[in-house]
Image: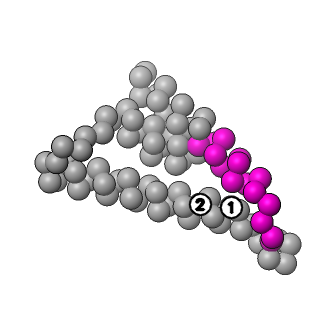
Amino acid sequence: MRKIIFVFCGGFLGAILRSIIYDIPLKKIDGIFPINEIIVNVLGCFMLSYITNLVKISINSKSNFKIDDDLYSAITTGLIGA
């Protein structure tokens, strides 16, 4: 149940951030090409791969960097997934 609450909170913040980025007035190419949507999706892909690799590297190298499973789910599934 705790993980669900974390994912819900992350999704809530992610949806707000997506809405804010969509509202940034950028010029559309020929009036139909959604630049804001492309920016949000590409940025989300890069952020998801960066966070996933950061956690994977920290597990393999036995470093001091640790992230809670609930927080990891909130960031990856909730915040970036939204």
For the point 66% across and 41% down, the residue is: 16
Colour mapping: one colour
Lateral position of residue 58 relative to residue 39, left or right = left
Q: Main secondary structure of the magenta part?
A: helix
Amino acid on which the number 2 mark rests in the picture? Asn
Image quadrant containing the N terminus: top left
Q: CA distance from mark 1 to mark 2?
A: 6 Å
Q: Position of residue 10 (x, y in %)?
A: 52, 36
Dot 1, how many residues are within 10 Å of its Cα: few (below 14), some (14-19), or many (20+)? few
Q: Are marks 1 and 2 in contact (CB under 8 Å)?
A: yes
For residue 30, what is the image quadrant? bottom right
For the point 41% across and 23% down, the residue is: 2
For the point 38% across and 53% down, the residue is: 51
Q: Which residues are magenta?
A: 14-28
Which residue is identified by label 1?
Answer: 37
Which residue is identified by label 2?
Answer: 41
Image quadrant containing the C terminus: top right
Dot 2, how many residues are within 10 Å of its Cα: few (below 14), some (14-19), or many (20+)? some
Amino acid on which the number 1 mark rests in the picture? Glu
For the point 45% across and 46% down, the residue is: 76
Label 1 sits on a secondary structure element that is: helix
Q: Nearer the viewer, residue 73 or 24?
A: 24
Q: Nearer the viewer, residue 27 or 5?
A: 27
Magenta span includes 21: yes
Label 2 sits on a secondary structure element that is: helix
Magenta span includes 16: yes
Which mark identifies residue 72?
A: none
Lateral position of residue 16 relative to residue 28, left or right = left
Up-down: is 76 above or below 68?
Answer: below
